[in-house]
Amino acid sequence: MNSRSLDRTLKAQEVFEGGGVRLRRGFSNVETGQFDPFLLFDDFSSNVPEHYLAGFPWHPHRGMETVTYILDGAVRHKDSLGNEGVIESGAIQWMTAGSGIIHEEMPESTHGIRGFQLWVNLPQKNKMMPPRYQDLRGAMVPEVGLGKSARVKVISGNIGGAEGPLKSVAGNPLYIDVTLEANGSVSILVTSGHTAFAYLIEGGVAGDAPEPTYYAPGTILLFNREGDTLSLRAGRDRARFLVISGEPLNEPIAWHGPIVMNTDEELREAFRELREGGFIRPA
């Protein structure tokens, strides 16, 4: 096995989105090429209701997927196709916007919330596929031990003989939630050539280095694409982090707001349909 080295680290930056939600953004359009096929990563965790209760009122999506993972709290969603539900503590929703959907996501927790949203690009051949949802309760996510000191919830992909129940249409993604005991270490298998990053939720985590540097919560560790193993270690406290990996699409991106296409003309057409009608395709 060949352990990957760290390419770079990014500290999540505070931004305002939706109806005025204060969140921490790990990466977005500025770093798109480095995170292909992933487009954006947000951490909307907060103990202050005024930071998140305004939510994300009605907005469109086309040409991409959103993955919402709620550790604590609840978010109610509904859309232009008549779907409605609540994503509660431990649950995940993988929404494929495909040809187009208009939806809203409104937090319902008044005692704090912890959650994340990842945007995944769709390949050109799937940009206009019918929209779909994959909703998963926390109890449906398998959890396995990895090494002597790690517990892993497998949301998507295969780790330690456990297969995540969510199936994407692109990127062969791995999405796992790792808890690592204090001073423990873990090696996570990933596919060579795939993009791979970790997002730190709790504790301090270091990459594989002779003299480790421990990074704080709110940090993204982006690894080089050569190698098939991510080696991570915890500091003096227990650590928790997400590991996400996927196959780069290596396709052109035309992106504005919540719509991600391959060409500027496709982007203009999408917004023209939003103004004039035809954005939502019949089932």
Image (tube, rainbow, N blue to C red):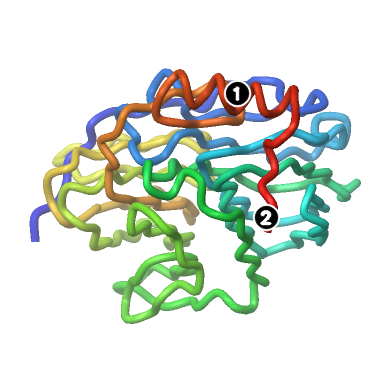
Q: Which quarter of the picture shows residue 134?
A: bottom right
270 vs 209, nearest the viewer: 270
Give whichever of 107, 160 is nearer the camera: 107
In terms of image quadrants, where is residue 144? Answer: bottom left
Badge 2 marks a residue whose secondary structure is: strand
Q: Estimate the x, y position of residue 35 in percent, counting from the top left.
A: 34, 35
Check the image and report above or below for 124 versus 184. above
Identify the image quadrant of the C terminus.
bottom right
| Residue 168 image offset from top left, x and y in percent | 45, 60
The nearer-to-camera label among 2 and 1 is 1
- Please indicate whether residue 58 sits to the left or right of residue 145 in the image: right
Residue on which the image places disc 2: 70
The residue type indicated by label 1 comes to Gly
Task: Give the vertical position of 107 relative to 164 (above or below).
Answer: above
Q: Earlier in the sequence, mark 2 or mark 1?
A: 2
User: What amino acid is at disc 2?
Assistant: Ile
Query: Taking 262 as reference, is 19 left or right?
Result: right
Q: Residue furthest bottom?
A: 161
Which residue carries the number 1 mark? Answer: 257
Q: Nearer the viewer, residue 59 or 52?
A: 59
Which class describes the residues within 10 Å of circle 2: few (<14), some (14-19), or many (20+)?
Answer: many
All told, the count of numbered labels is 2
Q: Locate residue 227 relative to residue 180 in the image: left or right.
A: left
